[in-house]
Image (spheres, grey):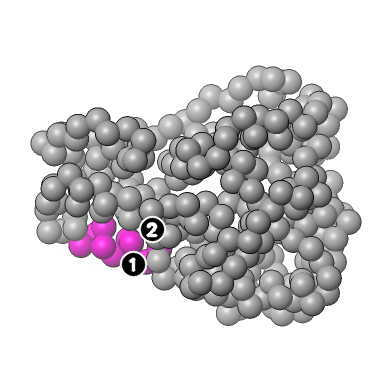
Amino acid sequence: MMRMYSLPDLRIPCMGALTRATLLYDYDQAPLDHTAINWDLEIDVLASQRLAGVAQRVLRDRGIDPPPHIEDQLRNANFYWSQVTLAVTAMALHDLRSLTDHRIPFVVTKGPGIASIAKRFIERPYADIDIMVDDNDFSRARATLATIGYVEEDKDMVPRPSLDVTCREAVNLHSPSGGSIDIHHRIPPWYWATKIGFGDLMSGSLHVTVAGGATLPCVSFADNLLISALHIISDKNKPGATLMAWRDFLMLAHATDPGEALVRAALGGDVGAGNAAPC
């Protein structure tokens, strides 16, 4: 059982020379020995961890030519994630208007806001849009999106709707047209961020230009830094396993004052078991 102030064991994936250089690129200019790259092993990690776009830039900047089949796989992974990101963003820009029309305030976390500070938007791809709403608007926001086809997959559903706000921080919704929106009423993990509410995030939010040129209301870079740090230690019970989350943390720590995130973290207040999600 996790206790107050205890830290989880991080499960950082094994990284080869190219993967490590890609993860730290722009912030650590250590030499990369191309003879140390295990191409066939590392390509799977780079593609699955959504780092193919950064890896392409690393290889280009370092003047390293990958084997033709590796170059093809990097290009294919980059193309796939660029299409997913563009499609999800376009769908969200259209579908989130329903919340605005019903006067339900929301703010976007992670993906689009972080992609806005990447060298290229495709270097920070995403497959869904995470939004946060006030807990009092959560059920209404879900019902509003349901009117345009957004539903939860059967495998993710809980026995009673009331458990959505007492035992989970969010629901993952999908539409037949390919939209994917996660509605949060708390920052995960609830254990540490129970007192950081929607109003706190909304007060510092900014409109960020996203893929396609439109804008979305996104949390501040400092708030995204805190959210990314918390993502690393929660991460679906595999803390530290997502290299993209570590990359997010690095980018955001260099784009804003980390002290601001510490101030926000301190506002989280008591993080003992008494404030953990009851389930």
Where is residue 50? Give x, y as percent: 39, 52
Where is residue 136? Give x, y as percent: 88, 56
Q: Earlier in the sequence, mark 2 or mark 1?
A: 1
In the image, is 258 to the left or to the right of 197? Answer: left
Q: Which residue has dot 1 on it?
A: 79
Where is residue 45? Give x, y as percent: 33, 45
Which stretch is magenta? 72-81
In the image, is 277 to the left or to the right of 53? Answer: right
Q: Indicate the quadrant where residue 141 lies.
A: bottom right
Residue type indicated by callout 2: Arg
In the image, is 249 to the left or to the right of 168? Answer: left
Mark 1 crowdedness (10 Å alpha carbons): few <14, some 14-19, many ≥20: some
Q: Is residue 178 visible?
A: no
Q: Which residue has dot 2 on it?
A: 120
Q: Main secondary structure of the magenta part?
A: helix
Return the residue nearer the eye: 189 or 162.
Answer: 189
Where is residue 255? Give x, y as percent: 50, 42
Q: Is residue 177 visible?
A: yes
The count of marks equals 2
